[in-house]
Image: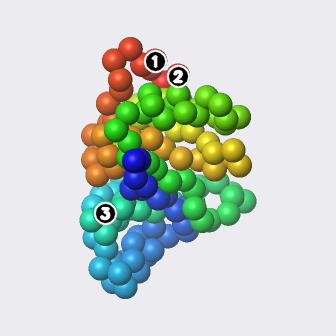
Amino acid sequence: MPKIRHLAIVCMNPKQLAKFYCEVFDMKVIGRNGRSNVFISDGYITVALLSQKAEGKPCGLNHFGFHVEDSDVIAERMKSWKVVGPEQRPADRTYAELRATDPEGNNFDLAEGGFDRSAPAGRKEGAPAPG
């Protein structure tokens, strides 16, 4: 069964929000990137605290991610639904190979390699390059 292992929250101050979750819930910082984003974890779920960059866009849940054994199986199941994706993520996105939406337009990622990595996600052989 696919498991939710990743949540992304758009926020005004990722560093301060990370401090809150670390002090209050004993979460640990597991990564940062040049975009001012901070990645924290409870050892089970990774939470990406994403710096607000879009004027007028509300802060809050941005997307969530499923760790799956085989994304092709999930893609096949999605064919009978009127949804977007799954589509390849850009090569510089390190945590997931694919992005899709549910029927109400909520974004979610699919990752065969999990969410606790910092190297770019691998692509299945023969998968199209992002572009």
Q: CA distance from mark 3 to mark 1?
A: 31 Å
Would you name the residue on which mark 2 appears?
131
Mark 3 secondary-structure assignment = loop
Marks 3 and 1 close (CB-CB < 8 Å): no
- Name the residue type under label 2: Gly
Q: CA distance from mark 2 to mark 3?
A: 32 Å
Q: Position of residue 122 (x, y in %)?
A: 32, 30
- Name the residue type under label 3: Tyr
| Point 53% across, 47% down: residue | 108
Pick whichever, 83 or 21, lies toward us: 83
- Name the residue type under label 1: Pro
| Point 48% across, 35% down: residue | 74
Would you name the residue on which mark 1 appears?
128
| Point 57% across, 62% down: residue | 61
Q: Residues within 10 Å of mark 2 (few under 14, many from 20)?
A: few
Is residue 67 placed above or below 83 in the rendered structure? below
Pick whichever, 119 or 56, lies toward us: 119
Is residue 98 placed above or below 130 in the rendered structure? below
Would you name the residue on which mark 3 appears?
44
Is residue 90 placed above or below 50 in the rendered structure? above
**With 101 as the anchor, is 116 left or right in this view?**
left
Labels 3, 1: front one? 3
Quadrant of residue 71 in the image?
top left
**With 74 as the anchor, is 79 left or right in this view?**
right
Q: Position of residue 120 (x, y in %)?
A: 32, 36
Q: Position of residue 2 (x, y in %)?
A: 41, 47
Q: Residues within 10 Å of mark 1 (few under 14, many from 20)?
A: few
